[in-house]
Image: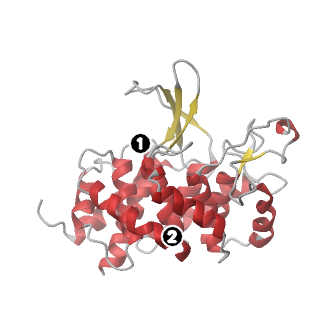
Amino acid sequence: MAKIMESQIETALEKGFSFLSSRQLPSGEFPTKQWIGDNACKRALKFPIKSVFVTSFVLHSLKYVSRFINVEQTAQKAIEFLLCEMEDDGLWRFYGKKSNIPYDIDCVCCVLAALKEWAIEMDYETMASRLLRYRTAQNVFNTWILDGDSRFLEIEYNDVDWVVNANVLFFYSLLSQRLPEVEQYIITSIETDTFKQRSIYYPPMSGIYCLTRAYSDGQNQGLKPAISKIKENLNTKAEDRSQDSLSTALATIALQNCYEGKAPIAQLIEYLISMQRIDGRWSTGVFFSSIVRKRPEIIFKWGSEELTTAFALEAISKYLDKSR
């Protein structure tokens, strides 16, 4: 490929943001799609759902886009949506306010982190202290907050996911609070190659993105022992041209997050931009999923064009920021 010009990169950024802002719902939410398929199902009917989770990730990405484009109005609408979806006790549910699902610490911490990045005034330290009660005996975090709603008090099982813990760690890192047991749990997940397999909720590349976000954007140096191995894995992924738009965008961000200086990813940026549609969007991919253990096994999947586009814009913005 010929070397891509900065003007082409800027055009891709502008087109992508134009698409993203045009797709924001009147509530301020960014669309989420959910679909169902087993392991053999290549295509499935995607239907829209309400979710605060996806909007929290889009809002995080917009923080980097804001260095090159005025995103203030779009970001403010997203912030208002997240604040409106907060329950009376200061927590969030994946499907939004008063939905029939327990609070989960992944969603809560991702929303809090996004609001913190945009300097929204909240008592983050008190919330961080409160969330510490949802840890196991090994001081890593369970996924579900089951005592926050009487409807779910009888649920006995609660899982532990390393990517969920990486997202929790990102929030605490923004507050400059160390969680050594969580850091070591994540490092062990990398050293034992657990990260190469799907976690309970996330495909491998989504997990790598969340880990490197906590390390780089959260400035958590406690995760540094895991980064060299992640970097090796990403260098291999960078050569893979069979990945979908979402995986390519996540790999491009994660690789940049692993480098303290300029990451060698010009060709990856060029490839990512080549995947952009004419209207500015990038295609939907599976950012997270959940398995229902039946026969046959059913997998619920979530993602959206808007989420993939936000990640692509984050990747491009970080590249532009470090190349100037």
Q: Residue at x 50, y 65 (%)?
A: 213
Q: Secondary structure at mark 2?
A: helix
**What numbered label is drawn on residue 215?**
2
Farthest left residue? 2
Gap in Å between the C-alphas at discs 1 and 2? 24 Å
**Quadrant of the rendered image containing residue 41:** top left
Locate residue 221 relative to residue 263 in the image: left or right: right
Farthest top residue? 295
Q: Is residue 107 above or below residue 228?
A: above
- The answer to which of 294 and 229 lies nearer the viewer is 229
Examine the rendering and report whether any part of residue 61 can be seen.
no
Q: Badge 1: few (under 14), some or many (20 or more) residues near its Cα, within 10 Å?
A: some
**What numbered label is drawn on residue 285?**
1
Looking at the rendering, in which quadrant would you find the N terminus?
A: bottom left
Q: Residue at x 51, y 70 (%)?
A: 215
The tag earlier along the polypeptide, 1 or 2, is 2
x and y, in percent, of residue 195 in the image: 46, 52
Looking at the rendering, in which quadrant would you find the C terminus?
A: bottom left
Identify which amino acid the numbered label 1 is placed on. Answer: Gly
Q: Secondary structure at mark 1?
A: loop
x and y, in percent, of residue 240 in the image: 25, 50
x and y, in percent, of residue 245 in the image: 34, 48
Q: Is residue 124 above or below residue 237?
A: below
Q: Residue at x 34, y 78 (%)?
A: 322
Q: Give the color scheme: rainbow, by chain, secondary structure or one colour.
A: secondary structure
